[in-house]
């Protein structure tokens, strides 16, 4: 009987020792890049030109800068507003394809913490 109790305690302690290690979650790769976000940012700041006019950042700065509140209100029709900004002669005076539209949209939604 004494041997049985000793064996049970030994197994119990061994099981606890194996399961008591510290938990280290997988860490996100800090060097992983979101290429779609990067493209959207490049379009916004003017590194990628959509036309012969101004970049998004040139129009939307200072008192005309984008604000989270106003973007939230227009989030359902943001594609229409982007299209308008890009194509009007006094603004971007250019065109935007679907890939660029989604990239710019992703940039705006992440930058201003909007919900899709």
Image: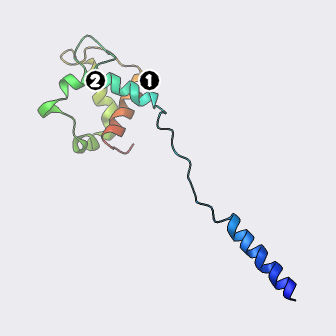
Q: Is residue 5 visible?
A: yes
Which percent across, then down, holds residue 30? 47, 37
Location of residue 29 with respect to 9 vertically, above or below: above
Which percent across, then down, holds residue 74? 27, 39
Comes first in the chain, label 1 or label 2: 2
The residue labelled by disc 1 is 99
Question: Residue at 25% across / 20% down in the picture?
Answer: 55
Q: Nearer the viewer, residue 99 or 58?
A: 58
| Quadrant the N terminus occupies | bottom right
Question: Residue at 39% across / 42% down in the picture?
Answer: 116
Instruction: Characterize the local packing of mark 2: few (<14), some (14-19) or many (20 or more) Cα atoms within 10 angstroms.
Output: some
| In this rendering, position of residue 101 left or right of residue 60 | right
Classify residue 39 by image quadrant.
Answer: top left
Furthest-top residue in this view: 52
Which percent across, then down, holds residue 41? 34, 27
Which percent across, then down, holds residue 63? 12, 33
What is the CA distance from the residue labelled 1 to the residue labelled 2?
A: 17 Å
Q: Nearer the viewer, residue 55 or 94?
A: 55
Classify residue 103 by image quadrant.
Answer: top left
The residue labelled by disc 2 is 45
Q: Secondary structure at mark 2?
A: helix
Question: Residue at 33% across / 22% down in the picture?
Answer: 43
Location of residue 38 with respect to 4 vertically, above or below: above
Q: Nearer the viewer, residue 100 or 5?
A: 5
Location of residue 41 with respect to 3 vertically, above or below: above
Instruction: Characterize the local packing of mark 1: few (<14), some (14-19) or many (20 or more) Cα atoms within 10 angstroms.
Output: few
């Amino acid at each position: 009987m004494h041997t049985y109790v000793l064996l049970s305690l030994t197994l119990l302690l061994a099981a606890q020792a194996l399961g008591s290690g510290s938990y280290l979650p997988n860490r996100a790769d800090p060097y992983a890049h979101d290429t779609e976000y990067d493209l959207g940012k490049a379009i916004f700041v003017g590194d990628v030109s959509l036309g012969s006019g101004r970049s998004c950042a040139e129009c939307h700065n200072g008192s005309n800068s984008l604000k989270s509140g106003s973007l939230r209100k227009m989030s359902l029709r943001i594609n229409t507003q982007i299209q308008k900004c890009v194509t009007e002669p006094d603004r971007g005076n250019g065109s935007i394809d679907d890939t660029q539209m989604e990239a710019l949209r992703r940039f705006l939604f992440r930058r201003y913490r909007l919900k899709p």
